[in-house]
């Protein structure tokens, strides 16, 4: 069993977020704790809050109303009620709930931002969040209702419903959770797990629900998935190049060095490695191929570079203090660190890159099945023992890829450029970051299936090509990729249901299985 992950607000990685998010409970789960130094920072920050409250001056989030009511000072007797009211009034999300891995990622990220010690909350809040993670309690969080500023207020308030309580202890105000395989109230789930729900003190409700945390969680998981999709896209490209006996000159190291972009150079190098030893490449005698083949490094390469940019942005975000106000040496400073623009813009950039990965993959699939473009392969890659026309071959498989690519064109339209004012124009520019995250994750899932379709189609084309050219052989890398695909999806002799093998390939991409077995 792995040792615990100690969060400190500074060193959390995207990989650890994904690891914690993807497994809810059971043997081998990565337990999470609060680092001792972070605990001491939080204690000191909480003491500053207590001193500010005792001082009696109005401080936003401690003893004032919120948003447009920031100028309304609240009496000391009502500060606890103020915090609970904030959660109750802001938990107004709607729509389908977020997937459990998104919720778990958000819980870990929120705990880590509080661990920085700039939010003025008790360590007990982080302890409770981590206890929920470690016990496998997953709150039900509606996915619609966040503008990404002031952070993801509605989703985080639904999370806080489970964590917090008041003197009434109403079960109907405790949210809902999945725990031990059952759906139950937050009150019942926390009690079953032996975790005490907290009465929130000054600043604590605002610290819980103020920040683009769900937006960041969606981005972290989408980036993790996108890297596996890109690795599979390179395998699909290699098999398509083999099936079409493509020209190798387009992947020459000198050519890519002349363009200077490192992502492009790295993709071309991996393609050369996949194809090394092939007897099919250059077999058609063409001087150059269509763009979807010879320009693939120029499309996949920048996607890698953009994913690196998005990853760096997210890594800074998950280790940042994102609520308002923040505490510095006893002083409270109001600002806008909750604003999700930096997250939303990065995720929109990632969506553009990944949409193009899917778009160029769909074009290769179309070329493979078209007898006018596929270098002598059968129309629709109908098996040699099957009658074309009586059998449709892989015609409709391409339709699905095209439909997903078209959907991605809409999903790639930036969300972060859209804004509507709220809170009587006090919050007059919003980031729409959560929408960017939701779109990106759906888009990545679409691209995963587009690439699975290319793998399925290219493997069929490769087998047909090898039968047409006895004695030929694949490259060392593409031979492994072909074997990995064939272990999941057999050759198609006659028409059949394709959904099962296609989904199995998509799942193998998600698990990173094909890349591992191919040595990529």
Image: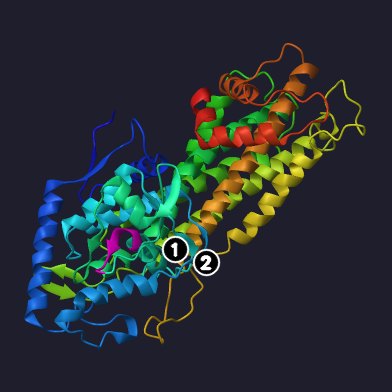
Question: Is 214 in front, or is 291?
Answer: 214
Would you say residue 329 is visible in this rendering? no
From the image, tell me which residue sits under label 2. Answer: 415
Q: Position of residue 59 (x, y in %)?
A: 18, 80
Above or below, 15 relative to 160: above
Q: Position of residue 390 (x, y in %)?
A: 92, 32
- Mark 1 packing: few (<14 Cα in 10 Å), some, or many (20+)? many
Question: Is 223 in front, or is 259?
Answer: 223
Q: How many marks?
A: 2
From the image, tell me which residue sits under label 1. Answer: 344
Which stretch did the figure color magenta? 161-167
Secondary-structure class at tag 2: loop
Q: Is residue 209 left or right of residue 518?
A: left
Residue shown at 36% from the left, 70% from the top: 339
C-alpha gap between disc 1 and disc 2? 7 Å
Q: Is residue 89 magenta?
A: no
Residue shown at 69% from the left, 55% from the top: 406
Secondary-structure class at tag 1: helix
Residue shown at 62% from the left, 39% from the top: 451
- Mark 2 packing: few (<14 Cα in 10 Å), some, or many (20+)? many
Kindly check if marks 1 and 2 are in contact, taking CB atoms under 8 A apart as contact.
Answer: yes
Q: Position of residue 492 (x, y in %)?
A: 77, 26
**Outermost residue, top side:** 471
Query: Considering the image in quadrants, where does the N terminus appear?
Result: top left
Q: Is residue 11 left or right of residue 327?
A: right
Above or below, 423 relative to 294: below
**Sequence-first disc among 1 and 2:** 1
């Amino acid at each position: 069993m792995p040792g615990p992950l100690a969060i400190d607000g500074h060193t959390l990685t995207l990989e650890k977020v994904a690891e914690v998010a993807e497994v809810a409970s059971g043997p081998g789960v990565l337990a999470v704790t609060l680092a001792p130094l972070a605990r001491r920072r939080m204690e000191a920050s909480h003491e500053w809050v207590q001193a500010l409250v005792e001082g009696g001056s109005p401080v936003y989030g401690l003893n004032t109303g919120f948003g447009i009511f920031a100028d309304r000072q609240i009496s000391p007797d009502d500060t606890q009620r103020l915090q609970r009211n904030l959660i109750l009034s802001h938990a107004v999300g709607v729509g389908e709930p977020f997937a459990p891995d998104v919720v778990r990622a958000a819980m870990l990220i929120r705990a880590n931002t509080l661990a920085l010690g700039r939010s003025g909350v008790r360590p007990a809040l982080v302890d409770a969040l981590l206890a929920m993670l470690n016990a496998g309690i997953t709150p039900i969080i509606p996915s619609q209702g966040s503008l990404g500023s002031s952070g993801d207020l509605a989703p985080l308030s639904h999370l806080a419903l489970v964590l917090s309580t008041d003197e009434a202890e109403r079960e109907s105000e405790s949210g809902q959770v999945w725990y031990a395989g059952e759906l139950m109230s937050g009150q019942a789930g926390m009690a079953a797990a032996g975790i005490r729900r907290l009465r929130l003190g000054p600043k604590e409700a605002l610290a819980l629900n103020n920040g683009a945390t769900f937006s960041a969680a969606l981005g972290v998981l989408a980036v993790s998935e996108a890297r596996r999709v890109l690795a599979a896209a390179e395998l699909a490209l290699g098999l398509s190049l083999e099936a079409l006996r493509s020209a190798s000159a387009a992947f020459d190291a000198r050519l890519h060095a002349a363009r200077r972009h490192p992502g492009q150079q790295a993709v071309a190098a991996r393609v050369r490695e996949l194809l090394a030893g092939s007897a099919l490449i250059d077999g058609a005698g063409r001087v150059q191929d269509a763009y979807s083949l010879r320009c693939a490094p120029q499309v996949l390469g920048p996607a890698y570079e953009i994913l690196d940019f998005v990853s760096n942005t997210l890594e800074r975000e998950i280790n940042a203090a994102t609520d308002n106000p923040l505490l510095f040496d006893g002083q409270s400073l109001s600002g806008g660190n909750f604003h999700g623009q930096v997250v939303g813009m990065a995720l929109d950039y990632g969506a553009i890159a990944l949409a193009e990965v899917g778009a160029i993959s769909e074009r290769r699939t179309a070329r493979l099945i078209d007898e006018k473009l596929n270098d002598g392969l059968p129309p629709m890659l109908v098996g040699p023992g099957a009658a074309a026309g009586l059998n449709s071959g892989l015609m409709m498989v391409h339709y699905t890829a095209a439909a997903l690519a078209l959907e991605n064109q809409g999903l790639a339209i930036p969300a972060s450029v859209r804004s509507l004012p709220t809170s009587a124009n006090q919050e007059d520019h919003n980031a729409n970051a959560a929408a960017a995250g939701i779109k990106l994750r759906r888009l990545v899932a679409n691209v995963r299936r587009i690439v699975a379709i290319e793998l399925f189609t290219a493997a069929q084309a490769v087998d047909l090509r090898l039968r047409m050219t006895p004695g030929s052989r694949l490259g060392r890398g593409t031979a492994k990729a072909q074997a990995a695909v064939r272990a999941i999806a057999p050759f198609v002799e006659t028409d059949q249901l394709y959904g099962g093998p296609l989904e199995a390939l998509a799942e193998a991409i998600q698990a990173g299985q094909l890349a591992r077995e191919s040595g990529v």
